[in-house]
Image (tube, grey):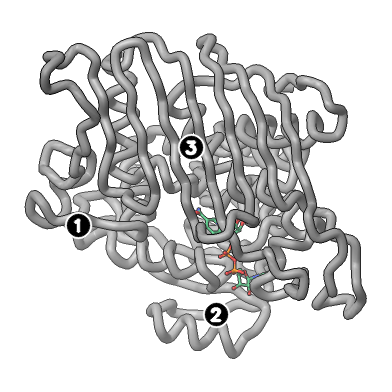
Amino acid sequence: MAKKPLNVGIVGYGFMGRTHSNAFSQVNHFFDVPYRPVLKAVCARDAGKAKTFAEQWGYESVETDWRKLVERKDIDVIDIASPNDTHHDIAIAAAKAGKMVMCEKPLGRSAAESLKMVEAVEKSKVPNMVWYNYRRVPAVTLAKQLIDEGKLGRIFHYRAKFLQDWTISKDLPQGGQGLWRLDVDVAGSGVTGDLLAHCIDTAMWLNGGITKVSGMTETFIKERHHNITGKKEVVGIDDASLFLARFANGSLASFEATRYARGHKALYTFEINGENASIAWDLHDLHRLQYFDHRDEGRTRGWRSLHITDGDHPYMDKWWVPGLQIGYEHTFIHQVADFLDAVGGGKVAAPTFRDALATDRVTDAVLKSARTGQWENAND
Ligand SMILES: NC(=O)c1ccc[n+]([C@@H]2O[C@H](COP(=O)([O-])OP(=O)(O)OC[C@H]3O[C@@H](n4cnc5c(N)ncnc54)[C@H](O)[C@@H]3O)[C@@H](O)[C@H]2O)c1
């Protein structure tokens, strides 16, 4: 049956602009979903670069002002793949214009911004989703299934890390193209909102809500040249962020993110310990799930390294043949597939803006705790 077209207007042609465009282009090749995304328009401030991107990816047109994009009658979904300081205004305008909204993470630069975005999409009743794509790594989705089936039993511990090393040089400037993540006005925070937000979204999806946190942050390089002001400016972001947490289910957690872990580029790992079983996952080996089940016969009990490539693993029946693995870009394709299925079936596509607000409340609480030195509530 012919699929209904769904006209996409994307803001941003950077790293995420590419992953999203690839996902919209590929989804119908592999998933039987009710819609066919049409790459209608790409929006970025530099018309020339946007045009080159449009030609490379097959967008039909270019806009240089997101307000124009949002006003266009021929756009069904606004996809926000631009830096964090743009999310709030674009999402609210898009919701008011009755568009579906897909937004990159973190939803806002603070929970206060995110709350306004949630109110806007809920008031307009438009489908909305935030790109916490790690939920759609098949091994992580399998972890969710195993936990929901009770395989781990009562959960005692959750441990997550996200380690990088790309900002160690004191000569690295802040601000502007490629370096907006170091500019607090644009990013909202440092690794707390950028990296820990991923860990927190996955953690709360797998293990339920976080109630309290105790955090510690550090900015190792205090001043950096600012690419936009041209002056040396104080660095306002957190370079490293660690926190302890209590979950509503009684389990205890530790989280760590830094851009100062020499040798690590994007090492996202988590481990969960339950009374019957434990699981562990590592982004560098994303197609594997480590599983230990204490109920196995003692003589052969041990950590199993599950290769998540078989047809009965999440999403994998849509890809190649058993034994052949998929990678990072597929998580975005899965997210688009789930979004289109949900929209077609009148269902909610998670994580919604409201789900992402819960994550921003935790990151706010971590930053507050780092300032006050006290335990802080994570769901205020
Ligand atoms: N889900 C993930 O794993 C993941 C990974 C990386 C980034 N992100 C998020 O995606 C967003 C974009 O990050 P990125 O790494 O793609 O950044 P990037 O710097 O690679 O690209 C940003 C793009 O936004 C455009 N842009 C900036 N301001 C704009 C404006 N006012 N109007 C229109 N376009 C504008 C830039 O020209 C550029 O094309 C951020 O919110 C980031 O946190 C998520």
Sooner in the amino-acid sequence: mark 1 or mark 3? 1
Q: Residues within 10 Å of mark 3 (few under 14, many from 20)?
A: many
Amino acid type of the residue that numbered disc 1 sits on in the rendered structure? Phe
Classify residue 87 as left or right of residue 157: right
Q: Residue at x 49, y 42 (%)?
A: 127
Looking at the picture, how far across and down is residue 233, in whole percent? 90, 67
Q: Amino acid at mark 3?
A: Pro
| Residue 44 x/y as whole percent | 62, 75
Would residue 33 be seen by someone viewing this image from the given angle?
yes
The residue closer to the viewer here, 162 or 106, is 162
The answer to whether residue 267 is left or right of residue 360 is left
Question: Which residue in the structure is indicated by mark 1?
Answer: 30
On whether ligand 1 comes within 8 Å of the CB at mark 1, the answer is: no
Q: Tell me how far mark 2 sits from mark 1, CA to CA.
A: 28 Å
Q: Helix or strand or loop: what does disc 1 sit on? A: helix
User: Taking the image as four quarters, which one is ligand 1 found in?
Assistant: bottom right
Is residue 71 visible to the viewer in this orientation of the structure? no
Name the residue rendered at 79%, 29% in the picture. Answer: 369
Task: Examine the image and state in which quarter residue 186 appears.
Answer: bottom right
**Residue 351, disc:** 3
Eyeballing the image, is 307 above or below 244? below
- Depth check: give the residue in front, 17 or 37: 17
Q: Which mark is residue 285?
A: none
Q: Which mark is residue 62?
A: 2
Callout 3: SS: loop
Q: Is residue 181 above or below residue 147?
A: below
